């Protein structure tokens, strides 16, 4: 047994010695074949153009750009339908023998879809954010988008059948601290069209008229220009399941789409087929 181990060790020593000799010979050959040459270059010589360094300003994080003044920036997310399947059914106004059931809310369906994306008319968000900035007070949206089911559940009157809430073209709201002063909010809205581009010096946007020759569901004649209509609901008007409070509120309706250069009107197709169910 000892003899076998001795022979194995001897073989290993021979292989290691041979390996070292071979490596040493390879290094000698490599060294004898090496050639060295100095590299010369002019002081102004450039193989590649110099790049000018410029500071890149990073894009803001969502939490940095998500405020208007002191308050969260109003986006389309604030307009999600407030329906809730937990709400108790009630008798329909137009058909007393049937019950009205609420929808599942924004978790069960999308906002209106335009161009393959969820959509709310931008002027509504722009105006509400402007109000927050100018009045230094938060805007509370009581009713943004209403799917047809929630629209019928909230207000089953015939007048409400063609509500623009269903197409993302209407919003009900009030301003905290100005609940009893809605006319001051109206003044701010009117001022938006006199201050902001591209409305400045455009008569059809700057000048507001009053709508007092049409049968409406409010006593105060609404204000309107080419793009929007402002309705004031007193504390005893316009009460529905989305506006259960004891003070006035304002409603903004979009009348004209500047991007498409067309009037904004309700249609059954837009309301019932214009959003996705989950």
Image (spheres, rainbow, N blue to C red):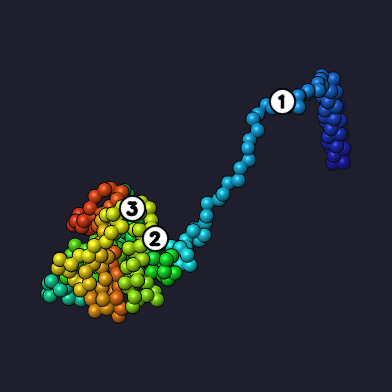
- Expressed as whole percent of the image width and height from the top left, the position of residue 277 reads 29, 58
Measured Cα–Cα span from mark 3 to mark 1: 59 Å
Residue 268 image position (x, y, % from top left):
18, 57
Frontmost of labels 3 and 2 is 3
Tell me: 190 left or right of 54: left
Q: Which residue is mark 3?
A: 201
Q: Earlier in the sequence, mark 3 or mark 1?
A: 1
Give the SS element for disc 3: loop
Q: Is residue 22 left or right of residue 166?
A: right
Asked if 65 appears above or below 239 in the picture, the reply is: above
Q: Which residue is mark 1?
A: 45
Residue 191 visible somewhere in the drawing? yes
Give the image quarter of residue 95: bottom left
Secondary structure beneath dot 2 equals: loop
Q: Residue at x 43, y 62 (%)?
A: 73
Residue marked by disc 2: 75
């Amino acid at each position: 047994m000892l003899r076998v181990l001795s022979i194995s060790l001897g073989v290993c020593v021979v292989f290691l010695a041979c390996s070292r000799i071979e490596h040493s010979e390879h290094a000698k050959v490599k060294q004898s074949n090496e050639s060295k040459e100095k590299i010369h270059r002019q002081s102004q010589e450039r193989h590649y153009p110099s790049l000018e360094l410029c500071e890149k300003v990073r894009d803001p994080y969502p939490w940095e750009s998500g405020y208007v003044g002191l308050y969260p920036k109003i986006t389309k997310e604030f307009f999600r339908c407030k329906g809730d399947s937990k709400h108790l059914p009630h008798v329909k106004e137009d058909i007393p023998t049937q019950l009205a059931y609420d929808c599942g809310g924004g978790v069960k369906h999308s906002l209106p879809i335009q161009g393959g994306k969820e959509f709310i008319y931008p002027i509504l968000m722009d105006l509400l954010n402007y109000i927050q900035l100018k009045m230094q007070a938060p805007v509370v949206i009581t009713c943004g988008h209403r799917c047809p089911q929630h629209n019928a559940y909230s207000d089953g009157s015939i007048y409400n059948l063609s509500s623009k809430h269903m197409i993302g073209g209407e919003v009900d709201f009030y301003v905290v601290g100005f609940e009893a002063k809605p006319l001051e909010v109206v003044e701010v809205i009117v001022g938006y069209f006199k201050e902001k581009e591209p409305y400045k010096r455009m008569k059809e946007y700057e000048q507001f008229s009053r709508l007092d020759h049409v049968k409406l569901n409010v006593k105060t004649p609404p204000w309107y220009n080419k793009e929007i209509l402002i309705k004031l609901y007193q504390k005893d008007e316009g009460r529905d399941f989305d506006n259960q409070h004891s003070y006035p509120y304002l409603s903004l309706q979009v009348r004209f789409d500047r991007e498409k250069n067309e009037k904004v009107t309700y249609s059954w197709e837009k309301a019932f087929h214009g959003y996705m169910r989950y």
